[in-house]
Image: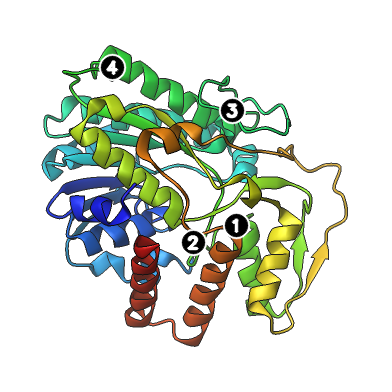
Amino acid sequence: MDRQKIFDFYKGKKVFVTGHTGFKGSWLVKILLMSGAEVTGYSLEPPTEPSLFGILGLGDAVGLKNITGDVRDFELLNKSLTESGADIVFHLAAQPIVRESYRNPRETYETNVMGTVNICEAVRLCGSVKSFLNVTTDKVYKNNEWAWGYRENEPLDGFDPYSNSKSCSELVTHSYINSFFGGNEDGAVVSVSTARAGNVIGGGDFAADRIIPDCVRAVQSAEPIIIRNPLSTRPYQHVLEPLFAYLGIAAEQYQDVKKAGFYNVGPETEDNLNTGELVGLFAKYYGEGFKSEIAPVDSTAPHEANFLKLDTSLLKSTFDWAPVWHTPEAVEKTVEWTKAWRLDPSSGNMNAVCEDQIKEYIKG
């Protein structure tokens, strides 16, 4: 993918983003606004305090129309999409935390499954949309804890309510493609893809039960980070990696429906690290007496996969895609952002930091 070409494509495009107040959504909106896109965001209030959305002052950003709404509210969602006149839709709204899905499984399914039904139906009824991307997760696959990466044709059967609800979200999207959007053939009504991304890290993530945000909170409190599952292995990548993959997929299928499909988005093999290694990288780049401790084994803790890896061959071969930053660089950029925020949290400063990182990423 030519990242500059992808960025330039969005100038003047009308883009609708669900979940735009979240961590990934805020970075996506920032990129789109920098590109000159006309963006409508539809989401609940930011899910954390502080939030990247608030830090960047995106609620007042020129070029962004903010709509506070729940993806479970079909009437408002449908009205908002229709009035936006969007060319391209990115669906990021979700309940994204595994442990939260154990605490509130019904809400997780309502948001992640019926939310997908609602946005698919809204796209079906909206005459302006040409390209639609549903963002799911690498956890959609039936996890056999094996050493090789899952491919897009593997069974979709997530274990926990979050992962399983995202498997269902995939199947809902597949049905809408086949039943209403004309499939991925010439003459399709809408070009539709799903993107199954690995774990993301980056500046501005304050979510609960995520290792890098836990590291940041440990720094702020001058307490050791407690590592819950030090040997759990995940495909970690900087947040800009999947976001530019999403932007590239949506742009390419906008111009050629045959590029639409179901794609894994993850790092290179060497960037599949365990939690202990990731914390070690954070400690290396942060310094300043950062400390960590391993939590005692909790036999009552809910099930979480120990090993997860993606095969990204299809994305690479279809779009000539390759990651830009390896995990050490991704952690370094996260630490760079965090230190800048702690030194000067003003919107002006943090917008400049985000813009610099986006420009650096585009240049490769």
Quadrant in the rendering for residue 320: top left
Q: Is residue 155 left or right of residue 10?
A: right
Kind of residue sitting beneath label 3: Tyr
Dot 1: within a 10 Å radius of its alpha carbon, few (fewer than 14), some, or many (20 or more) residues?
some
Dot 3: within a 10 Å radius of its alpha carbon, few (fewer than 14), some, or many (20 or more) residues?
many
Q: Secondary structure at mark 2?
A: loop
Q: Secondary structure at mark 4?
A: loop
Which of 138 and 256 lies nearest the eye of the viewer? 256
Residue 248 higher or lower than 132, as above or below = below
Q: Is residue 126 left or right of residue 282?
A: left
Quadrant in the rendering for residue 318: top left
Residue 290 is situated, as x and y percent measured from the top left of the image, at 72, 77
Residue at screen point 25% across, 57% down: 32
| Residue pointed to by mark 2 | 48
Dot 4: within a 10 Å radius of its alpha carbon, few (fewer than 14), some, or many (20 or more) residues?
many
**Viewer-nearest of discs 1 and 3:** 3
| Residue pointed to by mark 1 | 208
Residue at screen point 36% across, 16% down: 175
The C terminus, quarter of image = bottom left
Residue 94 is situated, as x and y percent measured from the top left of the image, at 45, 42
The reply to whether callout 2 and callout 1 are in contact (CB within 8 Å) is yes
Spatial distance from mark 1 to mark 3, Cα to Cα?
A: 23 Å
Quadrant in the rendering for residue 101: top right
Kind of residue sitting beneath label 2: Thr
**Viewer-nearest of discs 4 and 2:** 4
Spatial distance from mark 4 to mark 3, Cα to Cα?
A: 22 Å
Kind of residue sitting beneath label 4: Gly
Q: Earlier in the sequence, mark 4 or mark 1?
A: 4
Spatial distance from mark 2 to mark 1, Cα to Cα?
A: 9 Å
Residue 141 has which mark? 3
| Residue pointed to by mark 4 | 183
Q: Secondary structure at mark 3?
A: loop
